[in-house]
Image (cartoon, rainbow, N blue to C red):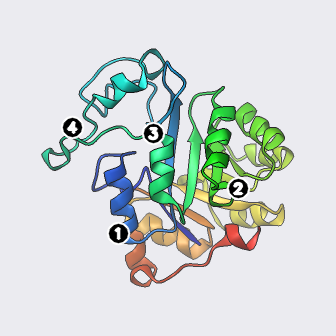
Amino acid sequence: MLRIGHRGDCGHAPENTLASFRKALEIGVDGVELDTHSTKDGEIIVMHDENVDRTTDGTGLIRDMTLDEIKKLDAGLKFNEEFKGEKVPTLKEALQLLRGKWVFIEIKQQGIEPRVIEIVRSMGMVREVCIVSFHQDSVKRIKEVAPEIKIGLISDKLEDLQVAIELGADAFSLVHTMVDNKIVKEVHKNGLLLSAWTMNTEEDLRKMVEIGADILVTDFPDRLNKILEKGDASTDPLKRSL
């Protein structure tokens, strides 16, 4: 079972920032999930939304802004005064910090797959990364171009398990409210890992632990650690499948 910090430790720090990733590492996780977009000048940055409005002190679409423009923004102040001055990280910066842990890179913007793959390869982190997306075409493209990198299909539809199987995905990532024992068994029967997102209450986290989900994604990894014997080392289903 893998403990994955959703956008880092975003329950306690501004999402998708180095500060959030550091907190997740300090708490004790097996990896983190982060989101990617491309800037106007082709740099891959870590951010969930297609614009900078919600999480920074700026406004505008990421694709219309250069990296220099985005680096001038404050990505921490809206969360808490404590994080004032926190910057939007590039994918390279995030991977450098997270080396040695699993990194689930979500493709938010179709068409950036080649650049993301290039960065992962250049960082020598092919075996530490799983690239995931709601976009089926993105998952398919990654499988074709970089078969050495693990991939996962994210969905909120049970019928998409068949799509994940046909795509040759390593993991099927399903919203936790749809996950039960039957689904876990079906996913495992087809040779995939079941990733559940995003559980934040003790009740929901405990349920996913008890039914045997392989990858648990949460905004509060400290709560998951308390359930999993205060952060004792968890087994790693992804490494077992390498």
Task: Point out which mark residue 171 bears.
Answer: 2
Instruction: Name the secondary structure under disc 1.
Output: helix
Along the line of sight, the residue nearer the viewer: 218 or 73: 73
Along the line of sight, the residue nearer the viewer: 189 or 140: 140
Instruction: Give the class, few, some or many, for how many residues have Cα within 10 Å of label 1's Cα (few <14, many ≥20).
Output: few
Q: Nearer the viewer, mark 4 or mark 3?
A: 3
Instruction: Name the secondary structure under disc 2.
Output: strand
Task: Point out which mark residue 90 bears.
Answer: 3
Q: Amino acid at mark 3?
A: Thr
Q: Amino acid at mark 1?
A: Glu
Residue 87, given in percent of the width and then of the height, sits at 30, 39
Q: In the figure, residue 186 lies in which quadrant? A: bottom right
Q: Amino acid at mark 2?
A: Ala
Q: How far apart in space, not on screen, are marks 3 and 1 (Cα)?
A: 21 Å
Picture mark count:
4
Q: Nearer the viewer, mark 1 or mark 2?
A: 1
Left or right: 66, with 100 as reference point: left
Instruction: Name the secondary structure under disc 3.
Output: loop
Q: Quadrant of the N terminus?
A: bottom right
Instruction: Give the class, few, some or many, for how many residues have Cα within 10 Å of label 2's Cα (few <14, many ≥20).
Output: many
Q: Which residue is mark 4?
A: 78
- Marked residue nearer the N-terminal end (3 or 2): 3
Left or right: 197, with 193 as reference point: left
Instruction: Name the secondary structure under disc 4.
Output: loop
